Amino acid sequence: MWYDAPGNNTDVVIGTKVVITRNIKGFPFVTKMTDSDKENVLGMVRQAGSQIGLDFVRTDELDDVARADIFNKGLVATSVVNGEDKYGILISKKEGVGVIVNSIDHISIVSLVPGDDVLLAYKRAEELAVHFEKNMDIAFSDKYGFLSPRISTVGTGVRVSVCVAIPGIEKTTGALPILTKRIEKYDWAMNAIANVDGSMRETSHYTINSVTTLGITEQELIDGANRLVADIIKLERSCRKNICAKKKVIVEDQFYRAYATLKYLRRADFSDAMTMIAWLRLGQDYIKHDDIDITWEKINKLTNMVRKNYDDYSRDRKVINNRPTQRAELIRSIMKGDIA
């Protein structure tokens, strides 16, 4: 998976996603398209993608194994792989890069990288965007930029989302409101990662999302993202260091409790699992633990495989009902090193 590759600052930034949307001139936006329109767009995008080696699949032809594989890569939402509508997905040979066809926009290019390399994620998505722009007539306005059915993506059509783990900030009195205000000043938004049932609970994991695409250049967006992420990393590391210095015994106790529980648990709710992973993340660089086998690679694998797993949303109710047990089995396997 894309998140197994080395990344920058993965102690704080789990991954970065860039999405570039484009719509084809001469076709209505997706909500107004006929079945014939959708088939034509699928054909056009598929043909253009085949020129650069992108593999094409239709969501209405996928079995559950294929749905799980695509969803777990992080390329699509459950509404795409489990929806009734006929979407197309183009998958690149590069891990973490794909294209969704006929979702909200005609073309949604997704690029995922581990850590905080916004520029790399953008370049991989832009390479595909340029290819599609050369091969079809893209809806564009000299005044507004690239057109979209959503005002939030008119302009550059580029959105950036950064997934961060900030247990230090969350556990430091007053730090989270300060961070929230700072994010708002950048004209970004912060959202807690929701439980699989849609409920919210503090688990120290958040997504930081760009908001503006109109009246801003791609370079300005990337520069702003880099400054904001650098601020978050600096604040989080400072908070972790301070907590581990002032409350060493408490953090050490919670760190070892989390490690032992994750290694031997038999049932695991989503929120509880993410909270325990956050304790490992908080103490990893500041608690001496030569007697146990825990690495940043293992912590990041736990984070990625627990926070986004198709079995949490499967259409098979039996799978969902058994999910706490299955999640525990997955966690134990990662902790033991059985999943490379």
Image: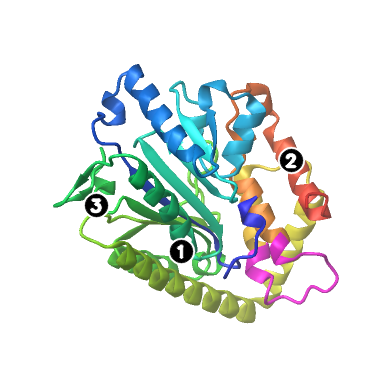
- Select label 2 or label 1 by which is in front: 1
Asked whether, in this view, residue 9 is left or right of residue 109, the answer is right
Asked whether, in this view, residue 47 is left or right of residue 158, the answer is right
State which region is magenta: 280-297
Comparing 281 with 233, the one in front is 233
Q: Which residue is mark 1?
A: 118
Q: Can you say whether 39 is above or below 183 in the image? A: above
Q: Seen from this angle, which residue lies furthest right?
A: 291
Asked whether, in this view, residue 24 is left or right of residue 107, the answer is left
Residue 136: where, in percent of width, then height?
33, 39
Q: Seen from this angle, which residue lies furthest left?
A: 143
Q: Which residue is mark 3?
A: 155
Residue 179 appears in the figure? yes
Identify the residue at image location x=65%, y=60%: 5
Q: Which residue is mark 2?
A: 267
Q: Can you say whether 139 is above or below 35 in the image? A: below
Amino acid identity at mark 3:
Gly
Residue 86: where, in percent of width, then height?
45, 23
Identify the residue at image location x=45%, y=65%: 119
